[in-house]
């Protein structure tokens, strides 16, 4: 089964506010763009992925991601994240009515194509399936097989909502890169330990060279 991935990207100016506000004074917009580029680049390199549709209202992010090979869709006004994801899924199936569709967070800078492939292979066995984030509270991937509605319920405690909706929880081990989203300095440290993509590594390196302290380690 080949998948269309729907990746939502916030306007960069409003992205990763907790990184901007943290003690390390990290460049949130630059990191958000780097995260998205590394995520989409890794997704496009996954053999189980047919194509990637990015939903965004940010022109810079859209242009850079389109240059990687993603299809860029305008974000519908005023609907929020779940509306954007549902819109992306509908557009994917307007082009390919039989598409298997999965959403993927845009802040997975350590994403490995092989690990994503394992997650999607597992998801292919169920009408709908999801992968919890590293914290065990949110969701980094939600998949809907051919002919099934995606029914996204992201933001906050989405793991519980997706489980309650009847989606199968993906319980694979060894797919840490698909779980490791980044919202805080500690998340970034964990992603760096896994090994991030080239754009994230470059931005993080420039931040350190400019004098930003390293993110604080977890106790």
Image: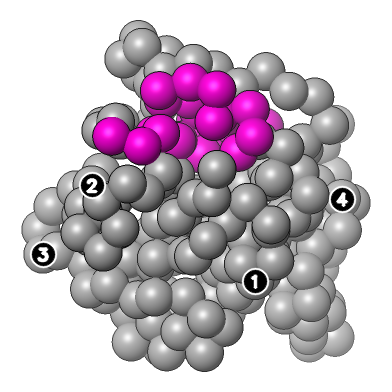
Question: Range of the magenta residues?
Answer: 120-147
Q: Which residue is mark 1?
A: 41
Mark 4 burial class by Cα count in 10 Å: few <14, some 14-19, many 20+: some
Mark 2 / mark 3, whichever is N-terminal: 3
Viewed as shown, does residue 14 lie left or right of 88?
Answer: right
Q: Which residue is mark 4?
A: 194
Residue 144 lies in magenta, yes or no? yes
Q: Which residue is mark 2?
A: 86
Mark 3 / mark 4, whichever is N-terminal: 3
Quadrant where the image shows the C terminus: top right
Query: Which residue is found at the position 57% from the left and 83% from the top?
Result: 68
Residue 36, given in percent of the width and then of the height, sits at 55, 68
Real-space Cα separation, disc 4 to disc 1, in angstroms:
17 Å
Mark 1 burial class by Cα count in 10 Å: few <14, some 14-19, many 20+: many
- Residue 171 lies, with reference to residue 28, above or below; the image says above
Badge 4 marks a residue whose secondary structure is helix
- Residue 101 lies, with reference to residue 130, above or below; the image says below
């Amino acid at each position: 089964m080949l998948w269309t991935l729907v990746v939502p990207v916030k306007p960069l100016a409003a992205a990763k506010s907790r990184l901007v506000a943290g003690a390390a004074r990290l460049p949130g917009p630059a990191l958000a763009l780097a995260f998205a580029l590394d995520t989409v680049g890794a997704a496009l390199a996954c053999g189980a992925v047919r194509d990637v549709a990015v939903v965004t209202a940010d022109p810079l992010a859209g242009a850079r991601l389109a240059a990687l090979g993603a299809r860029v869709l305008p974000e519908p006004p005023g609907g929020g994240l779940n509306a954007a994801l549902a819109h992306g899924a509908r557009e994917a199936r307007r082009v390919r009515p039989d598409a298997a569709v999965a959403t993927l967070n845009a802040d997975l800078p350590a994403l490995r194509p092989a690990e994503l492939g394992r997650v999607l292979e597992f998801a292919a066995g169920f009408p709908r399936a999801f992968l919890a984030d590293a914290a065990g509270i949110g969701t980094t991937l939600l998949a809907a097989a051919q002919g099934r509605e995606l029914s996204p319920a992201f933001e906050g405690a989405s793991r519980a909502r997706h489980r309650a909706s009847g989606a199968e929880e993906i319980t694979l081990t060894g797919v840490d890169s698909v779980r490791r989203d980044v919202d805080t300095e500690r998340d970034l440290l964990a992603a760096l330990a896994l090994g991030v993509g080239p754009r994230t590594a470059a931005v993080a390196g420039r931040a350190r060279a400019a004098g930003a302290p390293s993110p604080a380690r977890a106790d």
